[in-house]
Image (cartoon, rainbow, N blue to C red):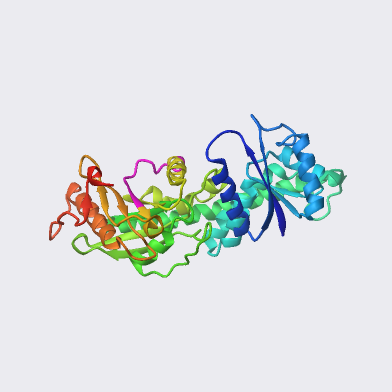
């Protein structure tokens, strides 16, 4: 499907990086971005988001380039999306809908499919009026439709019933995960969750640490389902390591809410390994976006170790960086080449041992300091 990408620069953040990410998102959804149309505005136009002049320019591009889809790098209101489709006579997708579509394509497990469908229906609920204007006359009570009920009202009622059923399923999944966590808690099992921006290399790192063989690819949202495995850390014993869904800027709120069941592994972890793409020029912005989502799900209080991944692409060396209190701050690794993985294992061992001592759990052998560690003052 041939598409045009539309981005409006409001003077906030890294605009070019955001457009590159939109192109990556579009390709991940199976779309071919043919052209990118940009403009600057102080604020969105209430009716067409981009204004009438730019809308006419986009409409001309649809004809000239034989486009089938227009993708906006922003969240559109239902009215804006409806107005744009009428103006273009072409399908219009906003950033939220695009991410939801990718999630729908990638969901493989029962848990993931339920959560994605719930998010899609919650998003659709605000847009049901689209396409039904010719069916809003009242019809008789045949089959599912009640007396005097319009097609639109029927759709809203059926959608509401489906959302209710999906929420009940998610409630059951949440209870099952809570039971599993209580079992680990009784065994004093240290729990670690991998979090980070999408495509930062979490699943590759998870496979290296656990030999699990979960799906990992150079694409956005390759992982939607939480996978947990036991990892033996020598003196610190066994820990449970969980791989979770990646985050992205402007992650749709519906997805955050729907994926609460999956993300609860993150909420209840003892430690977060925040995986960062060290080769990304916007890595600091990505760290900030991840921390915003962690705050939204109530996981911002959990201790973090930053894992600077892909150092083979950024030309850095495998080291451990500590703060002024000698606590581990960052570990520099390459999940692809294996560089620094021993340092990361040592860092996990040291942190787990410290938590056991703090909680009064005896270890047979005290863990020595991790080799290869450096203080921030000695970093280049």
Can residue 308 be seen here? The reply is yes
Q: Is residue 289 left or right of residue 141?
A: left
Q: Residue furthest left?
A: 365
Q: Position of residue 139 (x, y in %)?
A: 86, 47
Quadrant of the image occupied by residue 186: bottom left
Q: Which residues are magenta?
A: 296-307
Residue at the (62%, 47%) spot, across then down: 95
Q: Is residue 146 above or below residue 313?
A: above
Q: Position of residue 82 (x, y in %)?
A: 76, 42
- Is residue 63 or residue 353 the one in the foreground? 63
Q: Residue furthest top?
A: 42
Magenta stretch encompasses residue 89: no
Q: Is residue 225 above or below residue 19?
A: below
Number of labels in the image equals 0
Q: Position of residue 265 (x, y in %)?
A: 40, 53
Quadrant of the image containing the N terminus = bottom right
Q: Position of residue 296 (x, y in %)?
A: 46, 40
Q: Is residue 104 left or right of residue 209?
A: right
Quadrant of the image occupied by residue 129: top right
Residue at the (25%, 44%) spot, across then down: 376
Can residue 252 be seen here? The reply is no
- Is residue 367 or residue 253 the one in the foreground? 367
Residue at the (31%, 45%) spot, across then down: 303
Residue at the (27%, 60%) spot, across then down: 345
Q: Is residue 214 above or below residue 286?
A: below
């Amino acid at each position: 499907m041939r598409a045009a990408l539309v981005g409006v620069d409001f003077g906030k953040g890294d605009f070019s990086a955001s457009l590159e990410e939109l192109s990556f998102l579009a390709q991940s959804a199976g779309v071919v971005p043919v052209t990118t149309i940009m403009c600057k505005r102080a604020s969105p136009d209430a009716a067409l988001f981009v204004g009438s002049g730019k809308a006419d320019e986009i409409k001309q591009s649809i004809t000239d380039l034989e486009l089938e889809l227009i993708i906006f790098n922003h969240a559109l209101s239902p009215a804006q999306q409806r107005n744009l489709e009428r103006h273009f006579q072409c399908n219009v997708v906003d950033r939220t809908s695009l991410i939801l579509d990718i999630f729908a394509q990638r969901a493989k497990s029962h848990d993931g499919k339920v959560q994605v469908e719930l998010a899609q229906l919650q998003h659709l609920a605000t847009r049901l009026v689209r396409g039904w204007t010719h069916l809003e006359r009242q019809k008789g009570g045949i089959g599912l439709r009640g007396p005097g009920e319009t097609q639109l009202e029927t759709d809203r009622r059926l959608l509401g019933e489906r959302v209710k059923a999906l929420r009940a399923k998610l409630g059951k999944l949440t209870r099952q995960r809570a039971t599993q966590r209580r079992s680990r808690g009784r065994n004093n099992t240290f729990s670690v969750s991998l979090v980070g921006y999408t495509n930062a290399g979490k699943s590759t790192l998870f496979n290296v640490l656990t030999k699990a063989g979960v799906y990992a690819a150079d694409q956005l949202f390759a992982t939607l389902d939480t996978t947990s495995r036991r990892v033996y850390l020598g003196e610190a014993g066994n820990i449970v390591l969980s791989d979770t869904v990646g985050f992205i800027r402007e992650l749709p709120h519906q997805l955050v809410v729907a994926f609460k069941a999956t993300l609860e592994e993150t909420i209840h972890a003892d430690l977060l390994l925040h995986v960062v793409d060290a080769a990304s020029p916007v890595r600091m912005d990505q760290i900030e976006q991840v921390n915003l989502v962690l705050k939204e799900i109530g996981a911002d209080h959990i201790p973090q170790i930053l894992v600077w991944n892909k150092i083979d692409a950024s030309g850095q060396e495998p080291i451990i960086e500590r703060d002024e209190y000698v606590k581990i701050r960052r570990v520099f690794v390459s999940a692809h080449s294996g560089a620094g993985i021993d340092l990361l294992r040592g860092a996990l061992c040291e942190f787990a041992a410290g938590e056991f001592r703090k909680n009064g759990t005896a270890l047979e052998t005290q863990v020595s300091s991790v080799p290869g560690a450096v203080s921030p003052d000695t970093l280049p």
